[in-house]
Image (cartoon, helix red, strand yellow):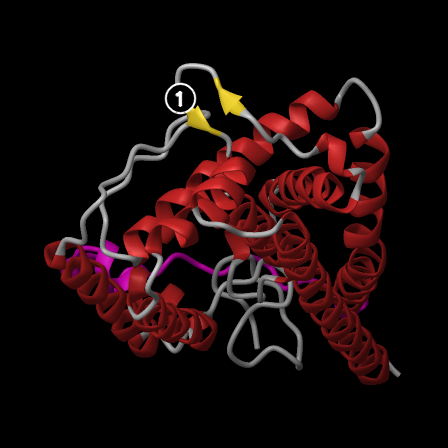
Amino acid sequence: MRCPKCQFDHELQTTECLKCGIVFARYQAALERATDPGARAARLPLAPPMPRAERNDAVRDDTVRELICRALAVPSALIVARLIAGTGLGTAAAILAMVLHETGHAISAWLTGRWAVPLLWVTPHGEQRSWGIVLTLTAATFFAGFYAWKARRWGWLSLAAAVLLLQLIVLRQPAPGAIIVFWGDGGAMVLATLLMAAFYAPRESARLRNSGLRWGLLAIGALSFMHVFLLWTGPWENIPFGEIEGVNLSDPSLLTEMYGWPVTRLVDRYVRLGQICLFALLTLYLWGLASAYLQTRRTLKAEA
């Protein structure tokens, strides 16, 4: 089928373009909405068809390139991030991780029904639960899930369902303050993993797949994750116990002194969370590599 946008034609593409990534039904609907009713009949002539050999070469090059990227990108990003963490550039990784750290505080506060404003180095949040915030978050998640279902975005629908389940679990916990504190570094590792996972976005996400955005998110995620993970797997003297001037006790000190967590339990929970994130990323890596390999085989077989 010929792509109405880039005119690329290939027998394997039936619902989406293998070159530019558009979904044919959505592109046509958007084109009709943007076109004046009186001008819809006046169709521009199609560009000359691309030679078959050139089309096959373009598809083959695209699938092979994607296979190589999926094989090397994530492991290379983590290795480079590990090397950077031991140099003077580790400060940049610390700043990126701090953004995700404060976002983790804010998200966990919202899940417990408290207002929160993520800022650099600190996240002010409410002390009491607000059912207005609880209902607002629930309604927003339901709306996002419904929109994902209508758009047949099953990944986003699964994420919305996971958020609702997580909110239900968090609301039943007896110590929401400890949850908010823990999910600073904990949230940083989870969010960094999600940023790296965005590298495996489906073909429908043409804006992400065909731009440098996927590489930028991968770099930010790898640097942030490695900075936090190395902190909790390294020597205990590197853990920032003590007081942050002008703010409060640091997160590790709050968890050990205010909430009574033993240091061994604190470190073990962060390390285990990091290992779970790495295992999830490894699973996604293997799936992405296998799917890209199978796609390459199908493409080469169709050309034979």
Query: Residue at image x 63%, y 70%?
Result: 9
Q: Is residue 173 visible?
A: yes
Query: Residue at image x 49%, y 21%?
Result: 244
Residue 256 lies left or right of residue 149; in this view the side is right
Residue 284 lies left or right of residue 57; in this view the side is left
Query: Residue at image x 71%, y 39%?
Result: 231
In percent of width and height, residue 63 lies at 77, 66
Q: Is 34 or 289 nearer to us in this picture?
A: 289
In magenta, the rendered stretch is 31-53
In percent of width and height, residue 297 lies at 84, 80
Mark 1 nearby-residue class (10 Å; few <14, some 14–19, many ≥20):
few
Quarter placement of the C terminus: bottom right
Q: Is residue 100 visible?
A: no
Q: Is 216 or 204 nearer to us in this picture?
A: 216
Where 259 falls versus 2 (above or below)?
above
Quarter placement of the N terminus: bottom right
- Report the predominant secondary structure element of the magenta stretch: loop
> Mark 1 sits on what residue?
247
Q: Amino acid at mark 1?
A: Val
Query: Residue at image x 50%, y 23%?
Result: 243
Where 133 falls versus 246 (above or below)?
below
Indicate yes or no whether the magenta region holds residue 143.
no
Where 165 falls versus 64 (above or below)?
below
